[in-house]
């Protein structure tokens, strides 16, 4: 046995990311990923975009409340800023129109219908100078029947290169809702702008933005955010999501063991903790600057 064979055998025996999945387990995982994946539709007065997201369920009091993780750039066209006077001083208030959540209903491996619900924006970070993350809350109660399982092992948050992955998203928008693709982690720690991404070969297309990337056992390890080709895509790794959630006191939206706030406390959360300097008027950025960033975004857009 040569050294390469021995190394691969050792990795397969001891690496927590190498799974031997039976056909039944693969079927169970794929059904779980179908149940938690949704299309995000953001319709403003002048534009419409579609992306992807994943559902999480939490119990608040006696109610089951459903939240959705997605990319900030998928819903950025819904952002509005208005000026108010507080104690004699002008202040800016950030507001969002409701987001449309479309849940594909799949039974026995085939589509049987869809459900549409409104969601409100709880937390938002801009894509051009922020983390490009957004947390939504579905207005209807008891909406999702399954909940995303996040990969939370602090000693294993960096996924090794070569680890097999799944992606489920709305490829090309609602037309390709709940499309499932596969690939691997192809590089770790790509810096684009001022933030870190991991690179993956899972197939992703416009509409994939916000969709989950999963280990073969179904654990969520990241969110598709940008891409420059079918097999060159960048995901926001779970370790970056955890830092953002901890900073903004929404760890409960990832870790189910965290104490849940009340609905009143959730509604009081500031949508943006630090206002962006260049978001109030996107025209302040040159067209060339905007396009150099936007070409990497993989949401679908309609005028």
Image (cartoon, helix red, strand yellow):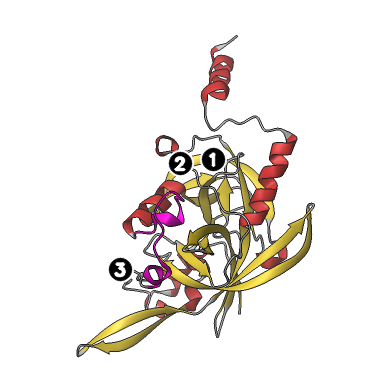
Kindly identify the residue that appears in the image at 41 percent across and 77 percent down: 282
Q: Is residue 203 above or below residue 101?
A: above
Disc ID at residue 185: 1
Identify which residue, 50 or 100, lies in the foreground.
Answer: 100
Q: Is residue 150 magenta?
A: no
Disc ID at residue 188: 2
Kindly identify the residue that appears in the image at 30 percent across and 88 percent down: 84
Q: Is residue 111 above or below residue 237?
A: below
Label 1 neighbourhood size at 10 Å, few (<14), some (14-19), many (20+)? many
Q: Mark 2 or mark 3: which comes first in sequence?
A: 2
Left/right of residue 39 with respect to residue 65 in the rendered view: right
Q: Which residues are magenta?
A: 249-267
- Circles 2 and 1, Cβ within 8 Å, touching? The answer is yes
Q: Position of residue 165 (x, y in %)?
A: 60, 42
Could you say which quadrant of the image residue 262 lies in? bottom left
Q: Position of residue 189 (x, y in %)?
A: 42, 44
Left/right of residue 192 with respect to residue 77 in the rendered view: left
Kind of element beneath mark 1: strand
The residue at which mark 3 appears reads as 274
């Amino acid at each position: 046995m040569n050294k390469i064979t021995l190394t691969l055998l050792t990795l397969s025996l001891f690496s927590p990311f190498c799974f031997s999945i039976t056909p039944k387990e693969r079927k169970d995982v794929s059904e779980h990923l179908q149940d938690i994946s949704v299309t995000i539709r953001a319709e403003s007065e002048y534009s419409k975009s579609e992306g992807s997201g994943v559902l999480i369920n939490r119990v608040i009091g006696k109610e089951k409340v459903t939240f959705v993780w997605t990319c900030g750039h998928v819903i950025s066209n819904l952002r509005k800023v208005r000026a108010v006077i507080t104690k004699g001083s002008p202040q800016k208030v950030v507001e969002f129109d409701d987001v449309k959540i479309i849940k594909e209903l799949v039974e026995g491996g085939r589509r049987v219908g869809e459900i549409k619900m409104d969601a409100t924006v709880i937390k938002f970070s801009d894509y051009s100078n922020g983390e490009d993350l957004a947390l939504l809350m579905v207005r209807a109660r008891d909406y999702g029947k399954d909940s995303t399982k996040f990969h939370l092992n602090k000693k294993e948050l960096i996924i090794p290169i070569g680890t097999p992955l799944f992606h489920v998203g709305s490829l090309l928008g609602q037309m390709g809702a709940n499309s499932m693709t596969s690939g691997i982690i192809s590089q770790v720690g790509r810096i684009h702008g001022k933030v870190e991404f991991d690179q993956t070969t899972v197939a992703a297309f416009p509409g994939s933005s916000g969709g989950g990337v999963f280990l073969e056992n179904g654990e969520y390890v990241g969110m598709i955010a940008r891409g420059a080709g079918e097999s060159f895509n960048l995901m926001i790794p779970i370790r970056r999501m955890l830092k953002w959630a901890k900073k903004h006191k929404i760890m409960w939206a990832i870790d189910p063991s965290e104490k849940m706030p009340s609905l009143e406390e959730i509604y009081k959360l500031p949508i943006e903790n630090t206002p962006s300097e260049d978001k109030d008027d996107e025209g302040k950025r040159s067209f060339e600057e905007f396009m150099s960033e936007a070409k990497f975004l993989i949401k679908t857009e309609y005028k």
